[in-house]
Image (spheres, rainbow, N blue to C red):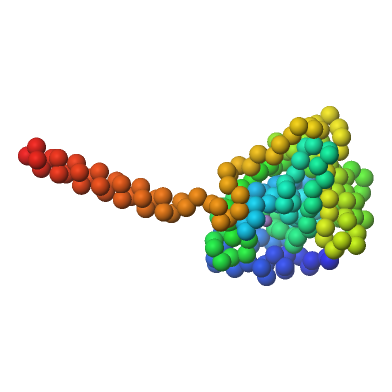
Amino acid sequence: MKKTRALSVYHKKRHFTKTPEPQGAVRSSTNGSLHRFVIHEHHATRLHFDLRLEAEGVLKSWAVPKGPSMNPNDKHLAVMVEDHPIEYGSFEGTIPEGQYGAGEVRIWDKGTYEAIGDPLPEQIKAGKITIIVHGKKLKGEFHMVEMKGRGENNWLLFKHRDEYADDNWELSPILHYGSRAQAPKAKKKDEAGKHALERLVQQSKKRAKTRG
Ligand code: MN
């Protein structure tokens, strides 16, 4: 993994006058064993889930096309992406058309995690991560393993077989569509609603007139 200096890559990719995403800054690292854990549901060009783990004052981030799973048999690709600011952990909204990562973003799960063994930055360097997740949907031990020689940033994410593991688990997204192109046309619907309302007002005025 190429070490990104602070949030420069994150900042370079975004226009903060055009996207509602937080600009943020690197925070001082938190002490103790519990750190922030977030999974975003991101309806971009392709629907994917973004796993974010707090370390070194930022959120270390991976894009997981198939999303996380509580089934230990599911080993899903997780592509490490640029560090995000801590503030991103509470971000939800719509990244506008034409901006980086355009599409709707929702918090799919949120909580804390603890690194088992070395602190997370050292585990990332070693290409092998073991964490315990305390989320609402994801719970218990998870592993991530870097796939060496398959591109620098490709990892596998999978559930450890513990008391929380569920072989029948199925991921349920918050929003019921896939890629951005399949998003319901909210604006058009609003306009249609407005027109319908205008028609109703006209009709009631006409009725009032005829009743005279
Ligand atoms: Mn994303």
Residue at point 79%, 32% (across, down): 166
Coordinates of residue 15 in the picture (x, y in percent): 59, 68
In which quarter of the view is residue 121 placed? Answer: bottom right
**Residue reaching furthest to the top:** 163
Q: Quadrant of ligand 1?
A: bottom right
Compared with residue 76, is residue 2 higher up or lower down, i.e. above or below?
Answer: below
Residue closest to the eye, 119 or 148: 148
**Residue reaching furthest to the bottom:** 12
Residue closest to the eye, 199 or 36: 199
- Quadrant location of the C terminus? top left
Residue at point 86%, 32% (across, down): 162
Coordinates of residue 56 in the picture (x, y in percent): 80, 56
Residue at point 79%, 48% (across, down): 76
Coordinates of residue 24 in the picture (x, y in percent): 66, 60
Coordinates of residue 109 in the picture (x, y in percent): 68, 42
Residue at point 58%, 44% (across, down): 175
The total number of labels drawn is 0
- Quadrant location of the N terminus? bottom right
Residue closest to the eye, 112 or 186: 186
Q: Taking the image as drawn, is residue 182 in sight?
A: yes
Residue closest to the eye, 141 or 158: 158
Q: Taking the image as drawn, is residue 90 in sight?
A: no
The answer to whether residue 163 is left or right of residue 209 is: right
